[in-house]
Image (cartoon, rainbow, N blue to C red):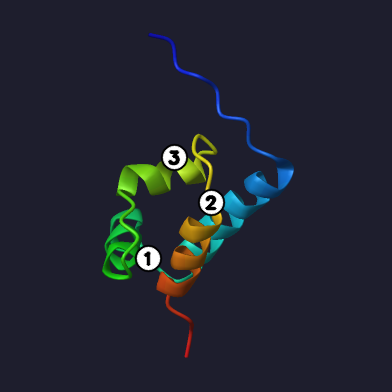
Amino acid sequence: MSKRRVEISTAGIRTAHNIESLRLARGVSQRQLAALVAELGRPLSHTAISRIKRIRRRCDVDDLATIAAALPWPS
């Protein structure tokens, strides 16, 4: 069974890079981010987060809103 290639727009690619940059700037691992978004009621595995980062999975608006809420803001 062949895998279907996911089409991701330029905006989606930029979003994936921004999520990764913010995650790293906040010192949050992919596993920690997965746990944080699960606590907010939007379970995403660390594999799903990795796929978003590697532009292998789309990040829908619900994913994006939860990831934004989960990433800690600097004090």
Q: Position of residue 28 (x, y in %)?
A: 37, 65
Please name which of the two marks, 3 or 2, marks the residue nearer to the observer. 2
Query: In this view, which residue lies farthest toward the bottom?
Result: 75
Determine the secondary structure under disc 1: loop
38 versus 69 height, above or below: above
Residue 72's spot in the image, x, y percent?
42, 77
Residue 51: give x, y in percent of width and height: 44, 40
Amino acid type of the residue tagged 1 in the rendering:
Val
Marks 3 and 2, how far apart in space?
Answer: 13 Å
Q: Are marks 1 and 3 in contact (CB under 8 Å)?
A: no
Q: Amino acid at mark 2?
A: Asp
The numbered mark at residue 6 is none
Q: Vertically, is 31 above or below 27?
A: above
Residue holding disc 3: 51
* Nearer the observer, 14 or 39: 39
- What residue appears at the point 43 percent right and 10 percent down from the top-left corner? 2
Query: Which residue lies most toward the right here?
Result: 10
Q: Which residue is mark 1?
A: 28
**How much space separates mark 1 and mark 3, taking CA atoms?**
16 Å
Relative horizontal placement of residue 28, taking residue 25 as reference (left or right):
left
Q: Which residue in the protein does label 2 denote? A: 60
Circle 1 packing at 10 Å, graded few (<14), some (14-19), many (20+), is some
Identify the image quadrant of residue 18.
bottom right
Foreground tag (1 vs 3): 3
Residue contact between numbered discs 2 and 1, judged by CB atoms under 8 Å:
no
Tell me the quarter of the picture where residue 10 sits: top right
How many numbered badges does the structure rendering display? 3
Residue type at mark 3: give it.
Arg
The residue lying toward the viewer, choosing from 57 and 24, is 57
Answer with mark 1 or mark 3, whichever residue precedes in sequence.
1
